[in-house]
Image: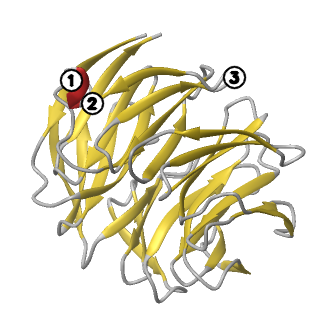
Amino acid sequence: MKAEQAFELTGHQNPIFAAELSQKPGLLFTAGNDKGLVEWSLTRQEFIKVMFPVAGSVYAIHCPVGFPLMFAGLRNGDVLVFDFIQQKIITTLKQHLKPIFDIKSIPNKQELLVASEDGSVSVWNLQDLTLLHIIRVSADTVRSIAISPNQQQMALGCRDNHVRVYNTEDYSPVTTLSDHTMAVFTTAYANDGRYMLSGARDAQIKVWDAASFELVKNIPAHLFAVNHILSHPTRPYFASASMDKSIKIWGADDFKLYKIISREKGYANHLLSINKLAWDGDQLISVSDDKRVLGWDIEF
C-alpha cells in the first residue's frame, strides 16, 4: 500500500474539528474553532467561500444523501440547517443545551440523529425537520453515532467508556459493550456490516462482531486517543486518526496494519492532533488542530 500527499489546504485560523463531503462531488466542508463553516473545491484544491458565520465551535457537519441540506452542530447545542437551494440557513434545531458531537442520518427512514454532551440523541424528521424522539443514552456525553450498512442498527460511543447499540427501527436498546477503559470517541461499521469498530481515549481500537457483539480483536492502535475511525466506502479497509498525529490504515477483514502516515515515517503530516477523516474514493482527507486540511492519495 502506498500513500502520497495530494494537497494541503490552508486558511483556517484555529483547530479544525469537523469535515464532511458535500452531496455534490468535488466539494468539502470543514469547520472548527473558527467563526465560519468553509467550502473547498477538491477538484481545484482551493478555498471557495465561507458558507455562513457561526457563533461558536462546530464539532459536527452532516450532509444527508437525497436532501439539499447541511447540518452543523454547535458547541452551544444548536444545530444550524443550511439549504443549498435557497443558499441560506433556514432554521435552527433547538433541543440540546450542551455541545453537539455527532450528526448522522438513516436514509431509508429519512431521519436525522443528533448526539450531544447532555447524554441524549435526538431524532428528527428530515422532511419537515420536526423532533420525533429523544433517546436517553447515558448520564454523560454521547460522542459518536455509527449506522450499520443495512441501517438496522446503530452504535453510540459514550464518554462513560461504553458503546451502546440500538435497534434503529424503534430505537430500543440492544446491548452495551464495556471493554474500553476510557471515553469512547468514535464508532464505525466495516462496509460489509460484519464488524463494528470502536476507538477510545485509551488508544485502543476494538473490533466487535456486529451480530453476536462478541469482542473479536483488541488493537493497541495508537499512542494516544483514537479520535476517528472511518471505513473505506467500497474496499475492505478502515482508517484511524489519533491525537498522536498519525493516520493508520487497517484491513477490515484481517485487522492488519497496512499503512502509517506520520512525520516519523517521512510524511509531511499534521503537526498536532488529527481530529476527523473523510474518504473521497481512494483519497483520504484529514483535518487537524494544526489548522490544515490534507489530502492523501492511497494506492491499494
Residue drawn 79% across and 53% down?
153
Place of residue 281 in the rendered image (x, y in percent of width and height, measured from the top left): 46, 23
Q: Is residue 63 left or right of residue 167?
A: left
Q: CA distance from mark 2 to mark 1?
A: 6 Å
Q: Can you name the residue that lies furthest to the right here?
A: 212
Place of residue 279 in the rendered image (x, y in percent of width and height, measured from the top left): 44, 32
Q: Is residue 123 left or right of residue 165?
A: left
Q: Which residue is mark 3?
A: 253
Residue drawn 44% across and 19% down?
282
Q: Which residue is mark 2?
A: 262
User: Is residue 82 among what the camera can see?
Assistant: yes
Amino acid type of the residue tagged 2 in the rendering = Ser
Place of residue 23 in the rendered image (x, y in percent of width and height, measured from the top left): 46, 41
Nearer to me, 171 or 125: 171
Q: Describe the element under mark 3 as helix, strand or loop.
A: loop
Q: How many marks?
A: 3
| Circle 3 residues within 10 Å: few <14, some 14–19, many ≥20 | few
Place of residue 244 in the rendered image (x, y in percent of width and height, measured from the top left): 32, 46
Q: Quadrant of residue 236?
A: top right
Q: Which residue is mark 1?
A: 267
| Circle 1 residues within 10 Å: few <14, some 14–19, many ≥20 | some
Nearer to me, 237 or 102: 237
